[in-house]
Amino acid sequence: MTETVLVVPGDGIGQEVVPATVEVLEAVADFEFVEAEAGDHVKEETGEALPEETRRLATEADATLFGAAGETAADVILPLRQAVESFANIRPARAYPGVDALRPETDLVFVRENTEGVYKGIESEIDEGVTTLTRVITEDASRRIADYGFEYAAENGYDDVTVAHKANVMRVTDGQFLDAVEAVAEERSADYEEALMDALAMHLLLTPEDYGVVICPNLAGDMLSDLAAGLVGGLGLLPSANVGEDNALFEPVHGSAPDIAGQGVANPAATILSGAMLLEHLDYDEEAADVRSAVESVLADGPRTPDLGGSASTEDVTAAIVDRL
Ligand code: ATP
């Protein structure tokens, strides 16, 4: 069976790093690539950042590779994540030999609940100068993310599982989150530690080597994974996956980087590593490992893009990765 991969480069450097990733995927697998449009440039032309056709194609594809959207990011990526019904946002943050990292011993994977929490969008102004936000935590979604996190840790060889929370303050919502995690851990006979999310931010910074998989409610996962990005040398290296039951979307953590767009110097590593996650998701485990080791070898020996202190172009780096494959 030939899997269909929807390719949505989007805006800015998405137009550079996504074609680079398709080149890499073409070197290791025989997917059918379907390209679709989204982002600022589409809104300018049609008045709509995410055409219905793109959304539909995402629901039908086996997986989607997305680049970035600029001003219209929320109008594009949130509905696309919904289109693939993703409930888990997976954000690995790993330091690589040869890349200047604040904490070279970092090897973390954030498993972030992707559907609820404070991002449910229930906000209101109840009086002049008085606003509220409703935080939604359900037992089902909490159990589902916990199950995914424990499974991910077991499958990928991580011994340490930590659950981030703030149940000492958000007693009802994070209390329920913790209860759900505990129930799932018991069913799976899995070990884990609980950590208050504020203290965890400090510990991740000081001793990231003590942690492996970190299961988080939505906002905590968003913030802690960005903190971890700082530990490993910046945004150009961080991939991510939005995973649903039958579908998934893969994207770099970085945005459209308008400051360097069009110059051909964007680091393609984050998107190519997202491509490796896509390969794994579609059960191309060997090919995923090959892509990862090709990226690692190029990060170690060069060529490198300017964000990593080099002077190579996106094309040079991509060609070096394909060469190693
Ligand atoms: P957006 O509004 O689309 O999120 P942004 O510029 O606010 O764009 P990012 O796109 O994430 O946010 O970029 C933040 C900084 O990191 C910029 O200086 C950008 O040049 C740099 N950067 C991000 N991704 C890369 C990359 N792949 N290669 C090199 N530099 C990058």
Image: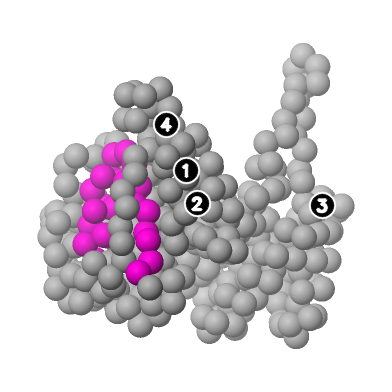
* Residue 173: numbered disc: 3
| Residue at image coords 28%, 70% | 30
Secondary structure under badge 1? helix
Give SS at disc 3.
Answer: helix
> On the image, numbered disc 2 is attached to which residue?
59
The yes-or-no answer for disc 2 within 8 Å of ligand 1 is: no
> Is residue 201 visible to us here?
no
Q: Earlier in the sequence, mark 2 or mark 4?
A: 4
Please give the residue where the numbered disc 4 appears in the rendered image. 49
What's under tag 3, amino acid-wise? Thr
Q: Would you name the residue on which mark 1 appears?
A: 55
User: Could you tell me residue 93's position as x and y percent?
Assistant: 45, 65
Magenta span: 2-24
Is residue 8 located in the magenta-colored stretch of the structure?
A: yes
Q: Secondary structure at mark 4?
A: loop
Proximity of marks 1 and 2: CB atoms separated by less than 8 Å: yes
Residue in front for this viewpoint, 30 or 300: 30
User: How far apart in space, not on screen, are marks 1 and 2 (Cα)?
Assistant: 7 Å
Q: What is the x, y in percent for residue 148? A: 63, 70
Secondary structure type for disc 2: helix
- Is 210 situated left or right of 251 in this image? right
> Which quarter shows the C terminus?
bottom left
Residue type marked 4: Ala
Q: CA distance from mark 2 to mark 3?
A: 31 Å
Tell me the residue at 80%/72% (across/down).
182
Whether residue 255 is visible, yes or no, is: yes
Cα distance between the residues tagged 1 and 3? 32 Å
> On the picture, is 86 further left or further right than 123?
left
Task: Say few, some or many: other residues with alpha carbon within 10 Å of mark 4 (under 14 / 14 to 19 / 20 or more).
Answer: many
